Image (cartoon, helix red, strand yellow):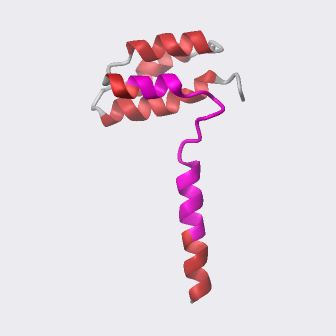
Amino acid sequence: LAEAWSTLSEPAQVLMRTHGVEGAYDLIKGFTRGISLDQAQWLELVATLPIPDEDREHLARLTPNTYTGLASRLVEIAVEQIAISRKT
């Protein structure tokens, strides 16, 4: 997983969609399909994304080891639901 830089295509797509970039999936797919993306290629891709600099910098700081997506929020929701179910 530590070398799976293509997993970071998800947050890139999300940020592009957030900023109204049409065809975000296809843009990322065109760059990542059929290759084993490494860190240098990831940073090259990030530098070309049509998003604000702040978001580009955020993506550049991500690594396959640090990106968790929605995992932490999903755990929070699960804990809340468990707590609610125990009250009833």
Q: Which of 71 and 21 is in front in this view?
A: 71
State the residue at coordinates (62%, 12%).
Answer: 35
Quarter of the image with the C terminus in it: bottom right
Q: In which quarter of the image is residue 62?
A: top right
Residue 72 is one of the magenta-drawn residues = yes
* Rendered view: 26 above or below 14: above
Answer left or right for 65 relative to 47: right
Residue 49 is one of the magenta-drawn residues = no
Q: Which of 25 and 60 is in front in this view?
A: 60
The picture places residue 38, in percent across and down from the top left corner, at 63, 14
* Rendered view: 10 above or below 47: below
* Rendered view: 75 above or below 10: below
Range covered by the magenta-colored residues: 56-79
Quarter of the image with the N terminus in it: top right
Q: In which quarter of the image is residue 12?
A: top left
State the residue at coordinates (27%, 32%).
Answer: 20
Question: Main structural element of the magenta stretch: helix, strand or loop?
Answer: helix
Answer left or right for 64 relative to 28: right
State the residue at coordinates (59%, 77%).
Answer: 83
Q: In which quarter of the image is residue 78?
A: bottom right
State the residue at coordinates (33%, 22%).
Answer: 53
